[in-house]
Image (spheres, rainbow, N blue to C red):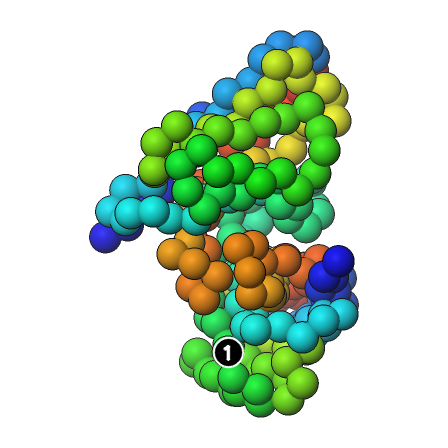
Amino acid sequence: GQQVMQIPQYQHVQEGEDFTTYCNSSTTLSNIQWYKQRPGGHPVFLIQLVKSGEVKKQKRLTFQFGEAKKNSSLHITATQTTDVGTYFCMGGGNEKLTFGTGTRLTIIP
Amino acid sequence: SQTIHQWPATLVQPVGSPLSLECTVEGTSNPNLYWYRQAAGRGLQLLFYSVGIGQISSEVPQNLSASRPQDRQFILSSKKLLLSDSGFYLCAWSAGTNYGYTFGSGTRLTVV
């Protein structure tokens, strides 16, 4: 079945440093979504990518969908303490999507 | 606007007791509905999803069941809870797989 892996599992960065998490699928994805879950909270939808090679930006966040539509990345420039949380990708195309394993980001002030 | 309600927020139940968690969505029709479970510090495991009333797909064999008695109501149940059922249960809805999921605030279940 479809598997979506994320790396790294954990990332500790100094405030102001950049952060990147990568999402890799064993199969071609029709789309990919990214979510953020704050500690103790629930996942919140950030963005969806659909097209091969698509790049979207939200302020300091840059999302990219690979040319083969099997991988994606989320890059945060100049992290802030408000970026703390776990970032999940989710991909698929049928009635259900498969969540990635998540990357937990902690910020050292 | 669409809203999703999930309750209760926390629950402590003894082993062997029944469970019923309810999720309702407002402001949309015929949503796709989902139940996920998240163990502490772990990823999200899809338990059940539904694309319509009475249509339930199970992803993981276990002692849990789900029902969708109304278009915007999704219920997660168990007849006898196990210790391993402890976790963070999240309900979600989407307009389809080309749309983002909106999650409820979750229920933290502790089975003792």
Q: Is residue A55 left or right of residue B23?
A: right
| Residue at (49% x, 42% y) in the render | B50
Q: Is residue A94 left or right of residue A28?
A: left
Quadrant of the image containing the C terminus of chain B: top right
Q: Position of residue B91 (x, y in %)?
A: 48, 40
**What residue type is disc 1 on?**
Val
Q: Is residue B84 visible?
A: yes
Q: Give the residue pinned by disc 1.
A: A50
Q: Position of residue B52 (x, y in %)?
A: 41, 42
Badge 1: chain ID: A
Indicate whether A58 appears above or below A12: below
Q: Position of residue A24 (x, y in %)?
A: 72, 72
Q: Nearer the viewer, residue B19 or B74?
A: B74
Q: Nearer the viewer, residue A50 or B71?
A: B71
| Residue at (74% x, 61% y) in the render | A3
Indicate whether B71 appears above or below A102: above
Crowding at dot 1, Cα within 10 Å, few <14 / some 14-19 / many 20+, comes out as some
